[in-house]
Image (cartoon, rainbow, N blue to C red):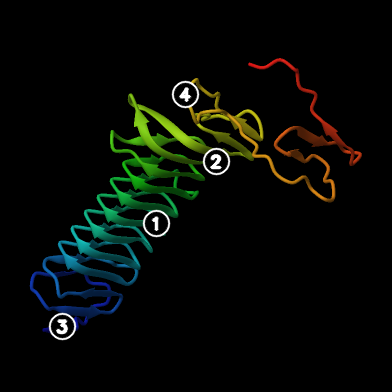
Amino acid sequence: MISIPSKSGTGIQNASNGVVVIGGNTAQLGGGLLNTVISTNGFGLAIGRFSTATGADSFAAGEGNDSGASSGVALGSGNQNYGQKSVAIGYGNISKGFAALALGNATTATNNDDAFCMAIGMSCNATADYSGIIGISPSGAAVINNSPSLWLFHNINSGKLTPDLVITDGAVGVGNKQTPTARLHIQAGTAAAGTAPLKIDGGVLLATKENGAIESDGTYVYFTNSAGVRKQFILSDSNY
């Protein structure tokens, strides 16, 4: 069945399979079940099953998705998009605010309606302007509320976020350094093998010296100063 309503911008509900409804500023494409388009200010498109497109120029496809904001997209299953120009893709994701992106499973990207934020992975939330979080949190929701910053992580330990990498305001934290206080801030090592804070493999030294370079030939460690002079680190003869 094809229906072309005469009133522009009328909200339309499709309760049948294989239905295409097109009208003025509103459109609904069926082939699904119980999709809803209520878009009074622009084009809306709902595809699949129990999906809703209520925002102007919004798009919902899959099962149980809700695209309720202007120029928003919800794809997959159980996704909710309530932010202008925001996107939620996957399963059970929520995007709010302005230009928010939520991808994966049970992720949330929400901000103050005026800045980008991003959450990618599973059970991770970005709640600050210009923030991003990427990772998998099988033990519960991981939340980043630092702005501006990007966190990469792999798990939650005892209910606390343990990021692998933090990038914020020109500083990089390696390991669980959530607020790095140097351009490169490295977490302390432990007695366990493979946890040293820093390693430099031995190799061939630069043929042309470069100011600020730190190198190792496998026997000694060298530093080239601002005058272009390569200096050897003086090491103790004591063995530990």
Residue where numbered disc 3 is placed: 3
205 left or right, relative to 230: left
Please tell me which residue lies in front, 145 or 230: 230
Residue where numbered disc 1 is placed: 86
Q: Callout 1: few (<14), some (14-19), or many (20+) C-alpha neighbours within 10 Å? A: many
Identity of the residue furthest to the left in this view: 16
Determine which of the numbered discs, if any, sits on residue 192 in the image.
Answer: 4
Question: Residue 204: x, y in percent?
Answer: 74, 46
Residue sitting at x 18%, y 65%: 36
Q: In terms of secondary structure, where does tag 2 sit?
A: loop
- Give the mark nearest the N terminus, 2 or 1: 1
> Between marks 3 and 1, how big is the CA–CA gap?
30 Å
Question: Residue 28: x, y in percent?
Answer: 22, 73
Query: Mark 2, mark 3: which one is toward the viewer?
Result: 2
- Give the mark nearest the N terminus, 2 or 3: 3
Please tell me which residue lies in front, 234 or 100: 234
The amino acid type found where label 3 is placed reads Ser
> Between marks 2 and 1, how big is the CA–CA gap?
19 Å
Tell me if residue 112 comes above or below residue 76 in the rendering. above
Please tell me which residue lies in front, 113 or 7: 113
**Label 1 near label 3: C-beta < 8 Å?**
no
> Between marks 1 and 4, how big is the CA–CA gap?
44 Å
Q: Callout 2: few (<14), some (14-19), or many (20+) C-alpha neighbours within 10 Å? A: some
Q: Callout 3: few (<14), some (14-19), or many (20+) C-alpha neighbours within 10 Å? A: few
Q: In terms of secondary structure, where does tag 3 sit?
A: strand
> Between marks 2 and 3, how big is the CA–CA gap?
48 Å
Query: Mark 4, mark 3: which one is toward the viewer?
Result: 4
- Give the mark nearest the N terminus, 4 or 2: 2
Residue where numbered disc 2 is placed: 148
The amino acid type found where label 2 is placed reads Pro
